[in-house]
Image (tube, rainbow, N blue to C red):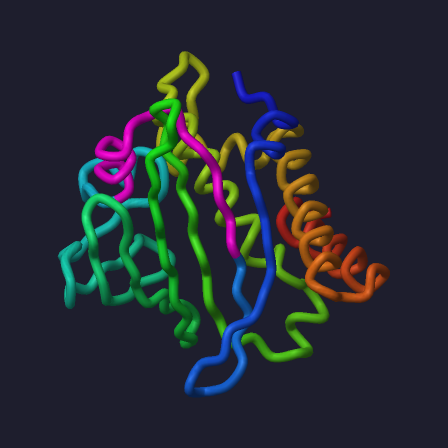
Amino acid sequence: MIDVNEDINAVARTVGTRTLEAGEARVLTVSRTYRTDLDDLWDACTNIERIPRWFLPITGELKVGGHYQFEGNANGTIERCDPPTGFNATWEFGGEVSWIEVRLSAQPDGSTRFLLEHVASVDDERWAEFGPGAVGVGWELGLLGLSQYLEAGADAIAGPEAGMAWAGSEDGKRFMALSSAGWGTASIAAGTDEAAARAAAERTTAFYTGG
């Protein structure tokens, strides 16, 4: 059984910036700890047979220089791979290129911390309209799917179809609304005007929930 509040509180969200050759980029960081060891989490995140069980169907070569394609979603190139602690890749979608950096770290209690940074050049107008939640909510849905898959409980979300069905439920909509609000709070912490950040979060919630 998914406990929406527990899963929302399990995630840490931060918003920042980074200077790239093309100029300043936005950086969203999302992290969560999983009750599994480092090698298992690495395999769940990089094994082409396991990824579709919690995220999306994927094809390609998951090695440095290899190209991947998520069905109906992003594609990109693997730029760096350091098993079992991290990888970097481009994230190409809708004619735009951004970058993801994944880092895994073993914790003293035997669990493993998953941290993802999504680095993207976003124009000020689009950022003002939706803020970090436009991307952040989607990543949190993925991390929730990973949690359910690793826990393998009786009510686990099993793959993208079941995940989409759950997202349309009342619990799913509440999860997305709370996630969007959380990214609004992270945006405020990064220096965004509070009213503007809350308004952007409300627009993001409406986008995800159809409200």
198 lies above or below 93: above
Q: Does the magenta segment cover residue 9?
A: no
In the rendered image, residue 203, in percent from the top left (x then y), is placed at 73, 57
Q: Residue at x 29, y 28 (%)?
A: 37
In the rendered image, residue 154, in percent from the top left (x then y), is placed at 41, 12
Outermost residue toward the right in this view:
195
Q: Residue at x 51, y 73 (%)?
A: 18
200 lies above or below 153: below
90 lies above or below 33: below
Answer with left or right where residue 33 lies relative to residue 174: left
Answer with left or right where residue 76 lies relative to residue 98: left
Outermost residue toward the top in this view:
154
Q: Residue at x 36, y 41 (%)?
A: 55
The quarter of the displayed image where residue 153 is located: top left
122 lies above or below 52: below
Answer with left or right where residue 148 lies relative to residue 196: left
Of residues 32 and 75, which is closer to you in this image? 32
The quarter of the displayed image where residue 159 is located: top left
Q: Does the magenta segment cover residue 37?
A: yes
In the rendered image, residue 123, in percent from the top left (x then y), is placed at 60, 79
The quarter of the displayed image where residue 48 is located: top left
Q: Residue at x 38, y 61 (%)?
A: 100
Q: Which range of residues does the magenta coloring cover?
A: 29-45
